[in-house]
Amino acid sequence: MTSPTVSSGAVGGTMAKLFAYAALVITTCIMVFPLVWMICVSLLTADRAQSATVSGDLVRLIPMEPQWGNFSEALSQMGSVRWQGFLDALANSVVVTTLVVVATVLSSSLVGFAMARIRFRGREGLFLLMLATMMLPGQVTMIPLFILFRSVGWVDTILPLVIPAFFGNAFFIFMYRQFVAQIPEALVEAAKIDGWSWLGVWWHVMLPLCRPVTAMCAVFTFIYVWNDFMGPLIYLHSDEQATLAVALNSFRNQYGGINKVNLLMAASLITMIPCIILFLAAQRQFIEGLGKGAVKG
Amino acid sequence: MASIQLNRVGKIYPGGVHAVQSVDLSIEHGEFVVLVGPSGCGKSTLLRMIAGLETVSSGTLSIDGVVMNDVPPQDRDIAMVFQNYALYPHMDVRTNMAFGLLRRRRFPSRLKACFSSAYAASRRIERSDIDARVMAAANTLGIESLLARKPAALSGGQRQRVAVGRAIVRQPKVFLFDEPLSNLDAKLRVEMRAELRMLHRRLGATMVYVTHDQEEAMSLGDRVVVLQDGWTQQIATPREIYETPANQFVAGFVGTPTMNLFQGTLACESGRMVFTSSHLRLEGSVPSWQPIVPSLPRSCCLGVRPEHVQLVASGGTPATIEAVEHYGDRMDVVIRSCGHRIVARTGPDATLRDGGAVAVQFDLARAHLFESTKPFARLIG
């Protein structure tokens, strides 16, 4: 009876696989560690959380007696009025995020489609100019924009956060343009001959075909707007207008320190849930959109 | 049905490329006209100008007497079948076919008041009418069972039928076809050709068809327009194009295998016509050539179709067989004689083999004479 032999190629393949898995596991651990830290802290008592975060002792982070009540406690203490602060902030976040996502998708896809398919004088120049705006840091335009919005009386309303989204986003316009450029022009021509206007072609033909880019645009925008702290902090001053990201700030004391880090982590964890669910739901289309949009048309 | 008039129509692309040059063409009501020519001859550009997908650089383009130069495609009442079908991939076959009518659908009564001003009342179509038209077109093309499928689930032939169906449903004035069969396999292409011909008979519509395949052009068109480098070379019935080609280009482009063309000198010696081209000497009595006798001797181009070249055992110009192509019902034989490569067509029963010796005779009475210099026009007939 002969013993089974293993070829050197097979051994090499297995080793390479092992290395790959090891690298992936280590990277995943590094990436997931902050989330795990957050979950652990959110389940500790206030004293233990304080000492664990100050000392940096990882063993003390392990919640021996998980404080599940921290989550309801955290939400109820958000803002100045019990529960009302959280509910207001949640409603504001939902309204602002929904409007911005819808506006960004509609405006960026429309402009991207026009840049890719409608021939007009100065198209390339305009596209380059639009791309150039991507190089401008947000902080540079912060003060001029604030002065502008204050002069039209929009401060302490959601308008400064929502209205700019109706004018497109340079990065997503670029993605839509590249994606639309890959779609056969004959489809646009067929729709034109079928009697549809440019708007009709965009709505009925292009937007449905751009689903991968739309998923990517929607997920990116949702995550950005949902977590945005700076925008609402600048423009929304009253408690009733605050979004979740700003409302979390109520856990800080008057000196800038954090009194109840466990409750802050619990509240933060809950605000993260919609982003995680959305990403998981749109994951396939999201990744497809990234890949397709990246290919030059 | 509609008539189309092209009056000195030209197209210059940015960069100065002249794609179409001063084309004059009048297409009658219900006529099937085929634009044919090699790649880059401007046939698709011409079709796209009729469709409104390309602007007209010069001249006037009219449909039913109305100048259409600046009318957008959606207002020309035309339908087009594209080379790659251009079916909307996210819609099922039913919606694909109905898509051109959905813009004109009648709104529900509550919405009617809001939108009624946007559409002319005469152009509105009931949803039930749209469904009926789609079903009728599907029945005509035998695709009723495919209506719920998406284009990705269809074969090439089925997609082609859906694309034609989408055009039929619109009931347009003019049908435009841009090489619609070029993506199909040879057998299906022949079948679809016959179906298109039947469809034209049934609908009686004005159709303009673009192809680079001269066989397709000859079999489909009531009239054929041969184009080269943007210029019209000949506009005639398929029979005329084949039997009396207007110039060397048409003679060489139409026919499979193509016409044998010899550059040489024609003279009249003792009442007999003598054509010499290097070592090849052909002579005979050709009464139809009498009109050009006063201008002889002159250099010209002689064209002889392969079916008018006979291979004989003896009594002709000696030749060597280079290749024999069997087609079952016939044989095309490539021979070399007096330094010329010549193609002859014979019956299927001839016993010929590569490298064999043979003699060749030309039927000069059915040969064609062309000028040997630009514009290489036909000399007689």
Image (cartoon, coloured by chain):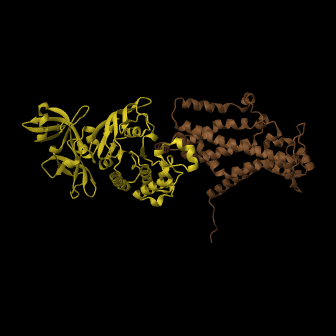
Chain colours: A brown, B yellow
Q: Residue at x 80, y 49 (%)?
A: A269
Spot occupied by residue B66 in the image (x, y as percentages of width and height): 38, 36
- In the image, residue B34 sits, relative to residue A235, either above or below, namely below
Left or right of B215: which side holds B110?
right
The answer to which image quadrant residue A9 occupies is bottom right
Q: Residue at x 43, y 38 (%)?
A: B52
Spot occupied by residue B172 in the image (x, y as percentages of width and height): 41, 46
Nearest the camera: B3 or B301? B3
Spot occupied by residue B307 in the image (x, y as percentages of width and height): 21, 49
Q: Residue at x 66, y 57 (%)?
A: A14
The answer to which image quadrant residue B161 occupies is bottom left
Query: Is any part of residue A33 visible from this angle?
Result: no
Quarter the N terminus of chain A occupies: bottom right
Query: Is any part of residue A103 visible from this angle?
Result: yes
- In the image, residue B64 sits, relative to residue A153, either above or below, namely below
Farthest residue to the left: give it.
B270
Nearest the camera: A139 or B117? B117
